[in-house]
Amino acid sequence: MLESSYSDILVLLSMLVAMLASYTALDMARRIGAARSRRTALGWWLGGAFAMGLGIWSMHFIGMLAFSLPIDLGYDPWITLLSLLVAIASAAIALWVAGRKELTWVRLGVGALAMGAGVAAMHYSGMAALRMTPGIVYDPVLFVLSIAIAVASSGAALWIAFRLQQRSSHVLVLRSGAAVIMGCAIAGMHYTGMAAAQFPLGSICGAARFGVDAHWLSVLVTLVTVGVLAIALIISVLDRRHESHAYALSESLSEANRKLRHMALHDPLTGLPNRALLEDRIEQARQSAMRTKASFSVLFMDLDGFKAINDAHGHRVGDLLLIAVAQRMAACIRPEDTVARLGGDEFVVFAVTGEPEEIATLAARIVTAIADPFTIQGFDLRLSVSIGIAVYPMDGDDSHTLLTNADAAMYHRKESGRNGYSFFDASMAVNADDYLQLVNDLRFAVERGELVLHYQPKFDDPDGPAVGAEALVRWQHPVRGMIPPDQFIAVAEKTGLIVAIDNWVLDEACRQLKAWRDTAEGADWTMAVNLSAVQFNHSELIETVRRVLERHQLPAGSLTLEITESIAMRDVGESMDILRRLDEMGVKIAIDDFGTGYSSLLYLKRFPASELKIDRGFVRELVRDTEDEAIVSAIIALGRSLNLNIVAEGVETVMQQSLLTELGCDSLQGYLLGRPVPAADFLGAALPRAERRA
C-alpha cells in the first residue's frame, strides 16, 4: 500500500472550518424556528442550507487537500461539484428537522439517518473524485464506523440545534460549545473515513492529468468558504440586532399601553382606581351576585374640613393630604375590597360583603383612621369623614343607583353632624332624587336662558352716584322660582358646569356694561365679575376674556375680575402668571374676601392687583374700639401701602358706613347703599342718595 501523510496546518484549518460551519448551522436553525412568516423561514432555510453545506463540504475538501500520497493528485471537477450538492442537500434536511416546533424521536431518527447518509455520501463521492486506478480499497470496519459516526454526529447535531433554540439565556456560550463538539464529530467522521481508505502500490490518480490543481484550489476553497460563512453570520448578527431593536420597541409600546391602561383606570394623584374601574368592578360583582344571590356594599365618603385645609395651606399640601388619606383607607380594607377616588375629596369603598355588622365595622374603622392627625410638611392637620352606605340589591341593582343612594346617605350623615356613617334608607331617596333633578336642570339652565344677573352698585362717595356695579348671578328656575347662588354654585363646581355658567356671566355682564356706557349716566362705569376657582385655572380664561372685551368693544380697564384670596394663594406660581397676563391686557384684579385666608404678604405685594375687598364678616360686627375695627384698619393700611383701592362689602348700617369712610375705605358696597337689582332697575339704584330718597 502507498504511504500517506497529512499537512498539519490544513488538518487544523479543516477542523476550524467544521466548527465555524457548525456554529452557522446552529444559528440558522434558531432563525428558522423563530421566523414569524413562512417566507422569512424559507429564506433562512435556503441560505442556511447553502452556507452549512458549503462549510461541511469545505471541511471535507480541505481535509482531502491535507492528504498526500507519493504520486500526483487531482480532483474530477464534476464529481467534486456533485459532492458539494450532496452536502447542501444533507444540510437542508438537517435545518428542516432542527427548525421544527417539535422534535419527536421518530423525526430525530429519520433526520439523523438522512443527514448522516448525506454526509457519508458527500465524503465518499469526494474520494471518488480522485479517479484512482486501481480503485481505493476500504477497511470494512473503519468504513462502517465512519458511517456510524456520521449518523450519530448528525443526530447529536439535530438534537443540540433544536434544544438551543428553546433556550433564552446563555445562548451564545452554549452555541459556541456545541459548535466545537459538532465540528470535532464531523472531522472525526472524515478522518475515520480517510483512515479506512487504502491505496495499492502502483495506484495512479486518473484526475491528476485533467482535474483541478490542488495547490491553488485549497486556498480558493478556504477563502470562499470562510467568506460565505462569515457573510451568513454577519447577516444573522444584523438580523439579531434588528430583532433586538424590534423587541425593545415592542416592549416599549407594550409598557406604554400598560401605562395608558393604568392611567385610564386609575386616579393620577393617589394611584387608586377611578370611577371607570370602580363601576366595572361593581358590575362584575353584580353579575356574580345575581347568580349566587349574594350581596355587596358601596361606601361613599367625603372628607369633612378638607376644603378649609386646601384653601389655607395650598393645593400642594392638599394633594399630599389626599395621598395620605388614600393610604389610610387602603390599609383599612380587605384584599378583596376596592377603594377608589372619584375626584376632589370624594372616595368610594366597594366591599364584597353585604352584612350590616361587617360593613358597620369597616366604616367605623375608616372613621377612626381618618380622625387621627396627619402631619403634612410640618403641619398637624385634622380631618373627619362622612360615609354613606348602600347595599346591593336592597338599595339599588346597578352601579349608578348604588352610588347615587350611597351619596345621598353621605349627605344625610353630613346634615346629621358629620364624622360618622349612615346606611341608606328610602327616606333619603327623596333628597337624592331632588339633587339629581337639580343637577339635570342646571345642565340646561344656560341654553334655556334661565340664568339672570343682578347688579349691586359700588360707591366711592356714599352720597354720590355709583361708579360701577358687581354682577351677581341668579337662577330663575321655571318651577322652583328664583334660586340664589349659594344653592347652586357649589353644585355647578362639583359637576363641572361652572365654566359654562362663568363664561355666560362674563359675557352678559360685559354686554350690559356696554349698554350702560353708551348712556350719559354710565359713561365711566366699571363692572366687577367674580371668577370661580375652576374658571380661574381654566386654560381658555385669558382668550375668553379677550374675546368678550373685543365682542362688546369695551376697554380692558372697565372690567374688574374678582378672585378670592384662597384661590390666588392655591398655586402662587400659576396664579402669578395668570394675573400678570390679565394685567398686561389691562384688566383690573380685585382680591375678594380679603382677611379670611392665609396670604403671604411676600406674594401679595407681587400680585398685580388693583383692589382689595374686605370680607363682609369683618364689617358685620364692626363697631368702634373692637377687634374687627383693628383688623379692618390694618387691612386698609396694608392696602394703601401697596397702592390698592380698598372696598368694603356688606355695609348695612349708617355707623358701618361712617366708620369705614373714616378709616379710609375707597369704595363701599352693601344693602344700605344699594341692593342687587335687575338691570332694568339699576339706573335708579345708582342715583345719588338724595335723589333716591326723593
Image (spheres, rainbow, N blue to C red):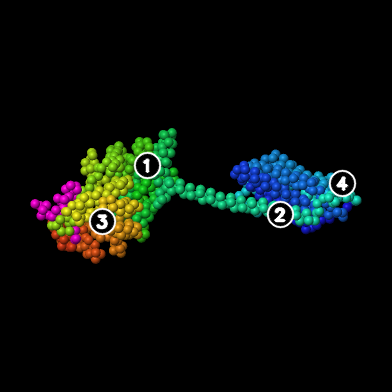
Residue closest to the far right: 202
What residue occupies the far left of the structure in this picture?
694
Distance CA(mark 2)–CA(mark 1): 73 Å
Element type where label 2 sits in the image: helix
How far apart are the two marked residues, 1 and 4, measured between alpha carbons? 96 Å
Tell me which amino acid carries mark 2. Val
Q: Which residue is mark 4?
A: 135
Along the polypeptide, which appears first: circle 2 or circle 4?
4
Q: Are marks 3 and 4 in contact (CB under 8 Å)?
A: no
Bounds of the magenta segment: 665-694
Q: Is residue 403 left or right of residue 465?
A: right
Residue 593 visible in this rendered orientation of the protein: no
Label 2 or label 1, whichever comes before in sequence order: 2
| Pair 1/3: label in front | 3
Tell me the distance, in whole angstroms, between the alpha carbons under discs 3 and 2: 85 Å
Instruction: Report which residue position mark 2 lands on.
Output: 226
Say few, some or many: other residues with alpha carbon within 10 Å of mark 2 (under 14 / 14 to 19 / 20 or more): some
Residue hosting label 1: 298
Amino acid at the residue labelled 1: Val
In the displayed structure, 625 sits above or below 176; it is below
**Element on which disc 3 rests:** loop
Residue furthest out toward the bottom? 641
> Residue 431 at x, y = what percent?
28, 40
Question: Residue at 72% across / 40% down in the picture?
Answer: 110
- Amino acid, disc 3: Pro
Question: If you read the primary sequence from the N terminus, does the residue marked by circle 1 or circle 3 appear first?
Answer: 1
Residue at point 72%, 47% (across, down)? 53
Of residues 270 and 602, the one drawn nearer to the viewer in this rendering: 602
